[in-house]
Image (cartoon, rainbow, N blue to C red):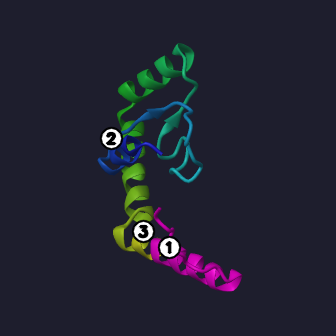
């Protein structure tokens, strides 16, 4: 996921996204936190015009996107997720009986 998307959302800047490799359904909600359109002039031009002309929509998208980042990507929550992942991986290693081995240098 490109950091620019998250930084834009965190900065409360409304945006128009086009589909890209790595675009996850976990990045906010389409039409709620950002606009998602096809990567062509028929998609980008109207969406950009809508955001430029509709101050209320622009403000709502910006506010909701920033709230999503604050609620979802909070540092404490992120650290908790990494800790849970690490514990889960460690448990899996113990269950499967993997052993850490040093690779011999020749």
Which residues fall within the magenta stretch?
82-106
- Residue on which the image places disc 2: 13
Report x, y in % for residue 33.
47, 46
| Residue at 42% in and 64% down | 71
State left or right for residue 21 relative to residue 69.
right
Please determine whether, in this image, residue 24 is positioned above or below residue 94: above
Magenta segment includes 51: no
| Residue at 58% in and 25% down | 38
- Residue on which the image places disc 1: 102
Point out the residue furthest to the left here.
11
Q: CA distance from mark 3 to mark 1?
A: 31 Å
Report x, y in % for residue 67.
39, 57
Dot 1 lies on which element?
Answer: loop
Task: Give the mark, 3 or 2, whose residue is nearer the N terminus.
Answer: 2
**Quarter of the rendering containing residue 37:** top right
**Magenta highlight: main SS:** helix
- Residue on which the image places disc 3: 78
Dot 3 lies on which element?
Answer: helix
Q: Nearer the viewer, residue 37 or 51?
A: 37
| Residue at 48% in and 72% down | 81
Q: CA distance from mark 3 to mark 2?
A: 22 Å
Q: Nearer the viewer, residue 93 or 81?
A: 93
- Kindly indicate whether the residue at mark 1 contacts the one at mark 2 (C-beta within 8 angstroms): no
Please name which of the two marks, 3 or 1, marks the residue nearer to the observer: 1
Q: CA distance from mark 2 to mark 1?
A: 49 Å
What number is the disc on residue 50?
none
Report x, y in % for residue 31.
54, 41
Task: Give the mark, 2 or 1, whose residue is nearer the N terminus.
Answer: 2
């Amino acid at each position: 996921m490109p950091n620019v998307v998250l930084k834009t959302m965190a900065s409360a800047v409304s945006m128009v996204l086009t589909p890209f490799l790595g675009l996850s359904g976990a990045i906010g909600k389409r039409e709620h936190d950002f606009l998602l359109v096809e990567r062509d002039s028929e998609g980008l031009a109207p969406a950009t015009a809508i955001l430029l002309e509709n101050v209320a929509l622009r403000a709502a998208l910006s506010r909701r996107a920033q709230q999503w980042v604050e609620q979802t990507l909070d540092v404490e929550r992120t650290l908790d997720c990494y800790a849970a992942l690490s514990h889960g991986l460690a448990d899996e290693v113990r269950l499967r009986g993997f052993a850490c081995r040093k690779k011999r240098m020749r």
